[in-house]
Image: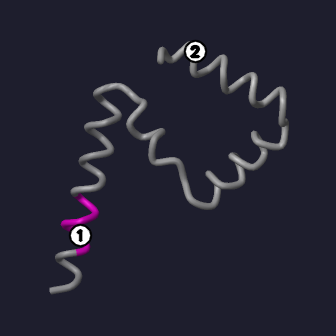
Amino acid sequence: MKRDDQDKKQIEEYKKNPMINFSNAVNRSMVGDLGALTKGGCLSKVITLVIIIGGIIMLSQCSV
């Protein structure tokens, strides 16, 4: 399914049930949307990867 088709389907769902949008926003604010990290371009993926690896290295150094 193409991205445009997915967007149109999602808009239709929001029109049928407007509370879905609110529910999604609340859930994402509590849990986070990890899919948003992968939607970016190459630069944002590299930056995200560097931050994650840096965090792992920092945690491993603190536990020693």
Query: What range of the chain is rendered magenta?
Result: 54-59
Residue 44 position by quadrant:
top left
Residue 16 forms part of the magenta stretch: no
Please say which color scheme the image uses. one colour
**Rendered position, 52 above or below 13:** below
Distance of label 2 from label 1 (alpha carbons): 42 Å
Task: Give percent across and percent down for residue 4.
Answer: 56, 13
**Rendered position, 39 above or below 3:** below
Task: Give percent across and percent down for residue 16.
Answer: 84, 30
Q: Quadrant of the C terminus?
A: bottom left
Q: Main secondary structure of the magenta part?
A: helix
Residue marked by disc 1: 58
Q: Residue furthest bottom?
A: 64
Residue 37 position by quadrant:
top left
Residue 5, numbered label = 2
**As rendered, which of 36 and 59 lies closer to the eye?**
36
Which mark is nearer the camera, 2 or 1? 2
Label 2 element class: helix
Residue 48 position by quadrant:
top left
**As rendered, which of 12 and 48 lies closer to the eye?**
12
Name the kind of residue labelled 1 in the image. Answer: Met
Query: Residue at point 83% right, 36% down?
Result: 17
Evaluate if marks 2 and 1 touch, with contact meaning CB atoms under 8 Å apart.
no
Residue 58 forms part of the magenta stretch: yes
Residue 6, numbered label = none
* 64 to the left or right of 2: left
Task: Give percent across and percent down for residue 38.
Answer: 38, 36
* 39 to the left or right of 63: right
First-in-chain label (2 vs 1): 2
